[in-house]
Image: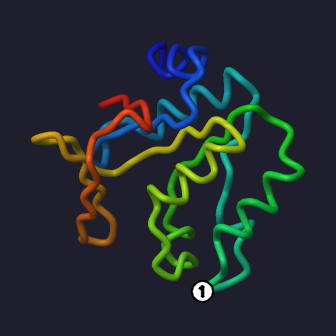
Amino acid sequence: MDELVKAIDTGNKLTLIIGKPGSGKSKIIHKYSENSGIPIVDFSKLTTGDHADIKKIMKDFLKNYRFDVLLLDNKKDFYRASNGTDLMELLKDLSEDVAVVATWNGFIEDGQLTHIVNGQEDIYPVDGSYKYIIV
């Protein structure tokens, strides 16, 4: 968790906690939540059903959000409601308004970030637009 605190304290706008299922991603973000008092956002309470405009929902949510950091874990409700919205694109967009910390089911290999969801792999370049912590 020290690495996460450092990433947030040094001004990173987007931090991904990357690991495979069972690696401890959720444990880290939950511990940070407990220590900081910042709640983890529950997508199921923000979405009203399938095919919601998740970008608009999240932007509207942030208008009244009172914390400097947005914590996102267990994003299965996001996938159900996203209607094909790219997760990385959404996270980068949100990080323009608030520092975002999100768990990321996947791995980094050969300069590529792989995200695994519902058995499908989405591949992104490893670049300087986000900080990552591998667990």
Residue shown at the point (71%, 61%) measured from the top left:
58
| Residue assigned mark 1 | 51
- Which amino acid, mark 1? His
The reply, left or right, for residue 41 in relation to residue 115 is right
Nearer-the-camera pick, 24 or 69: 69
Q: Is residue 91 above or below residue 18?
A: below
Residue at coordinates 53% horizontally, 34% vertically from top-left? 29
Q: Is residue 92 left or right of residue 109?
A: right
In the image, 134 versus 34, the foreground residue is: 134
Residue at image position (67%, 21%) is 35
- Residue lying at the far left of the rendered structure: 110
Q: How is the image coloured?
A: rainbow
Q: Which quarter of the rendering shows the C terminus?
A: top left
Q: Judging from the image, what secondary structure is the residue with disc 1 in?
A: loop
Instruction: Please provide percent x and percent y for residue 96.
Output: 65, 44
Quarter where residue 70 is shown: top right
Residue 73 horizontal/vertical position (percent)? 53, 49
Residue 24 image-quadrant placement = top left
Name the residue at the right extreme. Answer: 64
Name the residue at 32% across, 72% down. 118
Residue 135 in view (yes/no): no
Is the residue marked by circle 1 packed among few (<14), some (14-19), or many (20+) residues within 10 Å?
Answer: some
89 over 97 or under it: above or below: below
* Relative image position of residue 21 (x, y in whole percent): 30, 49
